[in-house]
Image (cartoon, grey):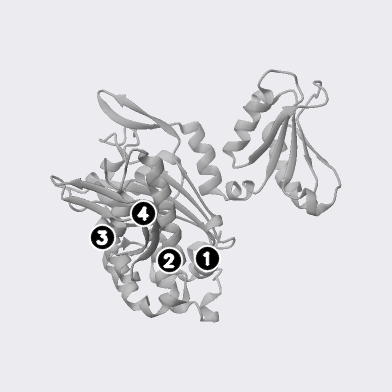
Amino acid sequence: MVEKLTDWKYIALIIFLVIIGIAIPFLWNDELSKISSRGPFKENKVNILAVGYDSDINGASRADTIILISLDVKTNEAGLVFLPRDTYINSNKRNFTKLNSSHVYGGIKLTQETVEEMLNIDIDYYLETDFRGFEKIIDRLGGVEINVSRHLNYVDKAGGLYIDIPAGQQTLNGEEALEYVRYRDITGDIGRIERQQKFIDAVLAKVLSPAIVTKVPGIIKEVNEAVNTNIPLQDITPFLNTAKEIKLSQIESKMLPGKAEYINGISYWVPNMQEAEIMVDNLIRNKSYIKNKEYNLTVLNGVGDSGAASDTAGLLEKYGFNISTIGNADKYDYDSSVVKYYSKDDAETAAKVAELLGGKTEFIEEAEEESNKKLEVIVGAGYEKSV
């Protein structure tokens, strides 16, 4: 089964092409590479709503892909939240109940207002494009080199879709690239997301390569024609260091948490707003999620209650931490949680974890090269108030 492209990878590609494509002509101009302290980027964090739509559908275009992107031009990090197009909108301010319908009733501006209202955030800029724009930009890049793991074959005569991509290393043109990221088989969304991750990695690697310089005029022309955005050209300068320095490991993406449900016979993605608040707070309002993923935590039960350590570990995972060990502490009479850290560089993070759990910190001096980015959390009394 093949369906419309609905994953964040497509729009992530477009936004980075916009940022990097416009910036490339200036990358070797030191004067323009300095981030200005003036303008709308004083806090070094920029939120962008990116929307992809299929212009071939009948009637007004519904948003097919919706992604909220937050860039930190100081740390060169990016947080992305993919918003399913069928996200349920429960608001008396709107005369629609699906997020993608906002594009029908009021275009990209109403979609922006709807996302801002739903997630209680401010969005600085927007951009949107369609499938044809995607194809043209890839063609301007000269195609994308991909090692296709297996033969991708699908025919939908009624829909006019013919996918026939052989296995092996090859260069995909715009049309083939769109087929590659749209293809969906028995592995469902998991397989498609894996392919799109592979694709976006390949595109970013090509866009950031020196060989792309000769293609800059054509890329800029195609981006200007294919993308509708309110990002002023003069405001692109603060993105220059981000374009030069960003690494794939500094791009963190998540899907809006929730579950599929039928309401009055209609299929929706109903968001879990409690979990969404945590995700948005970490990926969009600040970048702690990306920093937290560098940490390995040991979580120990110091209160004796069944599930105290595992429940707390689950909470900390939502904030991006890696949980290496879950177990029992040396005793069960801790009157409050304790967060042990072993490098002074980790004091601030340890303090934030302690604050989350209503506990305290304890510094244990060890060889720094062995202890950096390692925390031990002992769950004490009162932990349930935080979980």
Q: Which residue has dot 1 on it? A: 242
Q: Closer to the N terminus: mark 2 or mark 3?
A: 2
Residue 234, position in %: x, y? 42, 72
Quadrant of the frame with the N terminus: top left
Label number found at residue 187: none
Front of the two marks 4 and 1: 4
Q: Secondary structure at mark 1?
A: helix
Q: Which residue has dot 3 on it? A: 175
Q: Closer to the N terminus: mark 4 or mark 2?
A: 4
Q: Closer to the N terminus: mark 1 or mark 2?
A: 2
Instruction: Determine crowd level at label 3: few under 14, some 14-19, many 20+ residues with C-alpha closer than 10 A.
Output: some
Q: Is residue 141 left or right of residue 275?
A: left
Q: Secondary structure at mark 4?
A: helix
Front of the two marks 4 and 2: 4
Instruction: Determine crowd level at label 4: few under 14, some 14-19, many 20+ residues with C-alpha closer than 10 A.
Output: many
| Discs 2, 3 touching: Cβ within 8 Å | no
Query: How far apart in space, not on screen, are marks 1 and 3 (Cα)?
Result: 29 Å
Q: Residue at x 56, y 61 (%)?
A: 76
Q: Residue at x 29, y 24 (%)?
A: 263
Q: Which residue has dot 4 on it? A: 10
Q: Closer to the N terminus: mark 3 or mark 4?
A: 4
